[in-house]
Image (spheres, rainbow, N blue to C red):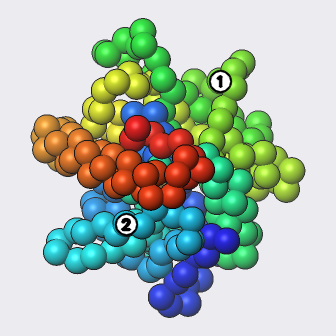
Amino acid sequence: MIKINLFEKVDLKEYTFLEGFPGAGLVGPMTISYIIEKLPMKYIGYLESDRFPPLIAIHGEKPLPAIRVYVHDRTKVVTILAEFAIPLDLTYEMVESVYGFIKENGISKIISIGGIPSQQQDQDSQVVFAITSNDALKKESQKAGMKTVGEGVATGINAMLMLKTMGEGVPDISILVPVDPNILDPKYAELAIMSLNKLIDLNVDIKELDREAKEVEAKIKEVLKKNREIQEAHKKAVGDDAGPSMYA
């Protein structure tokens, strides 16, 4: 069972939930981590499960759970930052836990952030795609400059969350940035943040992300390297039932 533990009682009614679990191009984690730092957001809790890889994250000389909950009161945004890929066999359990948290706290909207693998993407293109759960969000996304997806297939936690929201009427939008799956580029996060700024008036300055692009990319590569080592060690320890990893 995946538990969401909060350090304090918080009122999240009518807040927006930002979801960016690791996926193609690591668009979600890059975007979420930058937003957490620049707003800044408050660390209020973490996720735990005996089926998670045995690891902790260390930031600013402090050990931290690898999946954490953050909140920002002014913008009324709550988010979860995950620093390892969720094994495929935990997808449904994670969705149940996250959606239960959303419903229990009266969160009014979900925005997922991810990447669309594209080997032939135009590096100069600023196009960002959106999948929306209703027509009102479709209009909002188009007004924010995104192109709605007409045909295709969506997978992963964001797709399963949207399946639930469509059945219960919770507004849900997936922001999808075209990425080269073989490249980690902070520009992907820039495009996602630009769309978020227009969609919910987040007002996060992306100039620093642009200036520090090489440093951010180096940090992400280091995270990948460490996680690859941990994932491989975990697989050897528990066998092949741990599920596939994006770090393999």
On screen, residue 88 versus residue 208, left or right, reads right
Q: Quadrant of the N terminus?
A: bottom right
Give the farthest residue toward the right. Answer: 167
Compare marks 2 and 1 and give the one earlier in the sequence: 2
Callout 2: helix, strand or loop? Answer: loop
How far apart in space, not on screen, are marks 2 and 1 (Cα)?
37 Å
Q: Quadrant of the C terminus?
A: top left
Callout 1: helix, strand or loop? Answer: loop
Q: Is residue 155 visible?
A: yes
- Residue 16, by quadrant, is bottom right
**Amino acid type, residue under disc 1 in the picture:** Val
- Residue 14 percent coordinates (x, y): 65, 69
- Residue 233, by quadrant, is bottom left
The residue at the point 65 percent across, 64 percent down is 98
On screen, residue 105 versus residue 39, left or right, reads right
Which residue is nearer to you in this view: 199 or 67? 67
- Residue 63 percent coordinates (x, y): 27, 76
Q: Residues within 10 Å of mark 1 (few under 14, many from 20)?
A: some
- Residue 136 percent coordinates (x, y): 73, 41
- Give the numbered dot on residue 149: 1
- Give the numbered dot on residue 55: 2
- Residue 235 percent coordinates (x, y): 46, 51
- Give the numbered dot on residue 102: none
The residue at the point 72 percent across, 69 percent down is 100
The residue at the point 56 percent across, 72 percent down is 50
On screen, residue 220 versus residue 136, left or right, reads left
**Amino acid type, residue under disc 2 in the picture:** Leu
